[in-house]
Image (cartoon, helix red, strand yellow):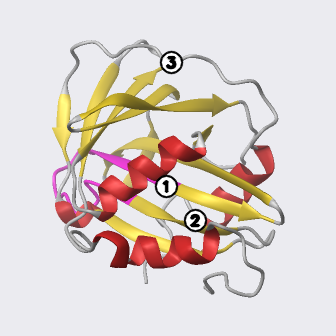
Amino acid sequence: MERGCGGDGMNAYRVLAALALAIACYPAKAEQPATEIPTTTLGGLDTYFEYGKTPAGAFFCGFMVRGNHKSSADPHIEWDMHMAEIRLNDTEAAGVSAATFVVSGHKRTLRSPITELSFSIPKDPAPVPVQIRPVQTGDDSVRGEIPLDDAHRLLTALANDVKVTATLRYADQSAERLVIMVGYFGGMGKNSVLADCQRGLLPWRPGRMPEP
């Protein structure tokens, strides 16, 4: 089972624990429309299902992106991302952590910080908004909250092998799109590993949560 992104500070448990503790602390804002920007399509094996429990006791079900990690080009760009539904005690939430790096000579250098992030799903006119949270994380990623209904749409699309598009905007005013797909768990609908995980996550049933 894939657990974390490795490298510079993108451990799934620390990432999601910090996100769970930060959620619901700040008011949401409206998602801004995307413009025409460059697009990169990631491979089907760049995204993995993940689940488990954080040190803080939060259970999560979701997907991890290790975008372009298999590239042998020097330099090249890598994207790290976690998208998950989270349960902490009696609180349900969903969110994302994300960071992107330039890799040269096996050294990762953080690119400009991500300031805006949203997702779109083919044949679904409603975007999946992400509210970036000003959370001190101690690593290179940013955190964002996704409304639970929107997160369910996003994760279900990925679980059913549907390509989704992430639109990222950066502090240096640049922007890009990532086409994300899962080539390992798709086409299983209500019997997918995500659905199995969510049956323990939502609704809350003590003692029936997925174990790491």
56 up-or-down from 212: above or below: above
Mark 3 neighbour density, 10 Å: few (under 14) some (14–19) many (20 or more) = few
Whole-percent x, y for residue 114 in the image: 50, 29
Residue at point 41% right, 55% down?
155
Q: Find out whether residue 79 is within the magenta segment.
A: yes
Q: Find out whether residue 13 is within the magenta segment.
A: no
* Separation of marks 2 and 3 at Cα, in angstroms: 24 Å
Q: Which residue is mark 1?
A: 82
* Separation of marks 1 and 2 at Cα, in angstroms: 7 Å
105 up-or-down from 36: above or below: below
Mark 1 neighbour density, 10 Å: few (under 14) some (14–19) many (20 or more) = many
Image quadrant of residue 17? bottom right
Mark 2 neighbour density, 10 Å: few (under 14) some (14–19) many (20 or more) = many
**Magenta region: which residues?**
65-83
Q: Which residue is mark 2?
A: 12
209 up-or-down from 183: above or below: below
